Amino acid sequence: MLFCAFIINLFSAASANTNISNALHNMCTLVIANDPIALREKIQKVKKNYRLKLQHYYSGISCAGNSLIRTALLNNANETGKFLIHKLPRATLLSPEPDGRTLQQWIDEKNLSDTPISLTLTNRI
């Protein structure tokens, strides 16, 4: 009986992870489309359904190897980029991303420091 309960919990956890992955699936598309309203709705839905804030899953989302804010910068998605900067805590914005570089270091390396997103980041941190 205990073994059956363990198996059911295991499948429930796997199902929950699949559901969360599905819920986060098109965030890259929303950023690239520069649709902050749809992105806000997606973030609110994830928060309501899974009790997760953006800062909890932000680092786990990769858009062709880039974070959501880097994707916004590369696609001139200024509104979504600025929205994300305002939604994330400063500590997240200042911490290194998976490649070891902070967002500001990456921006400087890519010569993107004169973009509206970069200016918003500078003002925020």
Image (tube, helix red, strand yellow):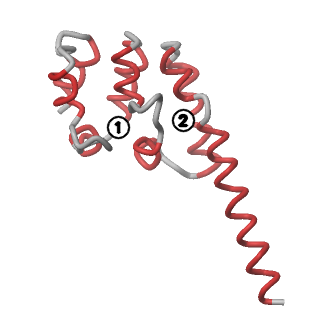
Separation (CA) of disc 1 from disc 2: 12 Å
Find residue 85 and report its horizontal and vertical position in percent.
32, 29
Find residue 29 and report its horizontal and vertical position in percent.
56, 21
Residue drawn at 44 percent across, 49 percent down:
56
| The quarter of the displayed image where residue 90 is located | top left
Q: Name the side, left or right, on which 79 lies relative to 96.
A: right
Residue 97, disc: none
Kind of element beneath mark 1: loop
Residue drawn at 34 percent across, 25 percent down:
70
Front residue of 12 and 88: 12
Find residue 44 and report its horizontal and vertical position in percent.
56, 36
Residue named by callout 1: 88
Q: From what the image shows, is residue 95 above or below residue 62?
A: below
How packed mark 1 is, by other alpha carbons closer than 10 Å (few <14, some 14-19, many 20 or more), is some
How packed mark 2 is, by other alpha carbons closer than 10 Å (few <14, some 14-19, many 20 or more), is some
Q: From what the image shows, is residue 62 above or below residue 75?
A: below
Q: Amino acid at mark 1?
A: Leu
| The quarter of the displayed image where residue 107 is located | top left
| The quarter of the displayed image where residue 112 is located | top left
Residue drawn at 59 percent across, 42 percent down:
46
Quarter of the picture holding the C terminus:
top left
Kind of element beneath mark 2: helix
Q: From what the image shows, is residue 99 above or below residue 32?
A: below
Q: From what the image shows, is residue 44 above or below residue 72?
A: below
Q: Name the side, left or right, on which 56 lies relative to 110.
A: right
Quarter of the picture holding the N terminus:
bottom right
Residue named by callout 2: 43
* Marks 1 and 2, the one that precedes in the sequence: 2
Q: Amino acid at mark 2?
A: Ile
